[in-house]
Amino acid sequence: MGLWLILMMLVLFVSWSNNKLTVMSIDVQEPFILGECDGGLGNRLRVLASYIVFTEAIYNNSLLYFIWQYNTDCPAHYDELFLPIPRVHIINSTSDIEELSKHPLLLEKFHNNRGNFDYNMGLKGIQKRHWKWYKRHSYAMINPIPSIMNKAKIYLQSYDLCKMPFLAMHVRRTDFMGGMNLWNYWKFTNDSLPDEKVFLMADNPASQHYLLNEFNKNGVEKIIVVEKMKLLDNETSSALPKAYRHTSVETALVEVLIAVYSSHFLDTGGSSFSELVKALWGRKNDWNLCPPPST
Ligand SMILES: Nc1nc2c(ncn2[C@@H]2O[C@H](COP(=O)(O)OP(=O)(O)O)[C@@H](O)[C@H]2O)c(=O)[nH]1
Ligand SMILES: [Mg+2]
């Protein structure tokens, strides 16, 4: 008798928990738009910034559900990098995405859009004269978590970069062949002033090692980096996935924050990672990673 009772309770529990699985796991009570991103950090953030504008300018301040998946292109979860944004819910589970796609309060679903910020504004008919304001406004909501800010702050102070103006350059090579050849970055460094440091952001170990070897000789540290990447032989590097990242995304973001404090930045044309430095250029005073000069 006792065994029957236990069996009955087990059957009841299983059917209850199965039912529960079909109940919405996200409690949506307001109209929302659903957007997704992919690619690397720069690609993702410009899509996020554009959709934030859409919620405000087109959808009467609706909520935004934003799909950010962890993958080879961007091996990091959103909340490992950035603080939450009011009225934006970041989601990464496929079941949540399916649920939200069918939800009655869904206003519009945006497929991944890699177009740059201005292109996205044009796509949704936002007036050109407002683009600049919206760009500043939406990127101002994107704030790295304190531990990442602190890494950039410590780095800037360790090289005295808050006191001495420095240059920065971004060399993007691994799975991207846009931009300039290494000669331009070599020349940029060679033309710098004697005491001026050149902060190098690079995605590719071979380019990084080449530039470091060219300029850091005889005890001089002309080019500075956050992390020296491991140089790989041809066989090992050709076995890696095309979009393999040689540093963590966290390190990449620390590099962006540092470059924002440079006096002059040489980009890789067409790279959205370079574009991110420019989009965040105006954030120096908000973040205050360099204390204001004492008078
Ligand atoms: N650490 C580091 N990572 C980089 C650098 N450039 C590119 N990456 C990595 O490569 C990804 C590039 O993707 P994305 O930001 O979309 O820029 P895009 O592909 O150049 O348009 C970034 O998310 C980084 O993970 C760099 O200078 N330093
Ligand atoms: Mg990309």
Image: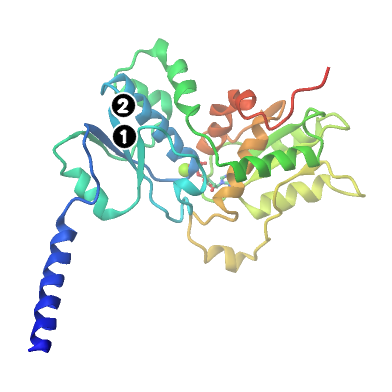
Q: Position of residue 36 (x, y in %)?
A: 33, 41
Residue to which mark 1 is pinned: 64
Q: Is residue 20 above or below residue 116?
A: below
Badge number at residue 151: none
Q: Nearer the viewer, residue 9 or 88?
A: 9
Q: Position of residue 31 (x, y in %)?
A: 21, 31
Dot 2 or dot 1: first in sequence order is 2
Question: What's the distance in space between the residues labelled 2 and 1, CA to CA?
Answer: 7 Å
Residue 181 visible here = no
Residue to which mark 2 is pinned: 55
Q: Answer yes or no: do the residues labelled 2 and 1 have beta carbons within 8 Å?
A: yes
Determine the residue positioned at 31% across, 34% down.
64
Q: Position of residue 138 (x, y in %)?
A: 44, 26
Is 82 left, or right, of 162 in this rendering? left
Q: Residues within 10 Å of mark 1 (few under 14, many from 20)?
A: many
Is 213 left, or right, of 227 in this rendering? right
Determine the residue positioned at 61% across, 33% down.
267
Determine the residue positioned at 70% across, 34% down.
168
Q: Nearer the viewer, residue 249 or 10?
A: 10
Q: Nearer the viewer, residue 214 or 25?
A: 25
Q: Residue furthest top?
A: 129
Determine the residue positioned at 30% across, 24% down.
61
Q: Position of residue 79 (x, y in %)?
A: 47, 46
Is 206 left, or right, of 46 in this rendering? right
Question: If the image is split into quadrants, where does the N terminus sit?
Answer: bottom left
Q: Quadrant of residue 131?
A: top left
Q: Is residue 28 above or below residue 284?
A: below
Question: If the image is split into quadrants, where does the C terminus sit?
Answer: top right
Q: Residues within 10 Å of mark 2 (few under 14, many from 20)?
A: many
Q: Tag 1, which secondary structure?
A: strand
